[in-house]
Image (cartoon, helix red, strand yellow):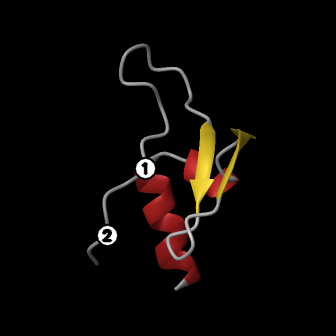
Amino acid sequence: MQFMKRIPSSCPACGEPLRIGRLKCAACETAVEGDFAFPALMQLPPAEQEFVLRFVL
């Protein structure tokens, strides 16, 4: 199974967890800015994300 690029969840400079700061609609370009946490499943390491996805499918 091939996936799109993964969203980075840790800082490439220091390794600390990243936070989401902006969400944008591709259709109308409305944007929402704030300090959002990644969903719980996105916080898992890639191998565990793959396991959960395969289990659910």
Residue at the (41%, 54%) spot, across then down: 47
Q: Depth check: give the residue in front, 35 or 32.
A: 32
Residue at the (42%, 42%) spot, across then down: 8
Residue found at the very far bottom of the displayed protein: 57
User: Left of 55 or right of it: where is 2?
Assistant: left
Q: Depth check: give the residue in front, 11 or 20.
A: 20
Residues packed near mark 2 inside 10 Å, few (<14), some (14 to 19) or many (20 plus):
few
Residue at the (52%, 77%) spot, across then down: 27
Kind of residue at disc 1: Ile
User: Left of 3 or right of it: where is 42?
Assistant: right
Callouts 1 and 2 close, C-beta under 8 Å = no
Kind of residue at disc 2: Phe
Q: Depth check: give the residue in front, 24 or 16.
A: 24
- Disc 1 to disc 2, C-alpha distance: 11 Å
Residue beneath disc 1: 7
Residue beneath disc 2: 3
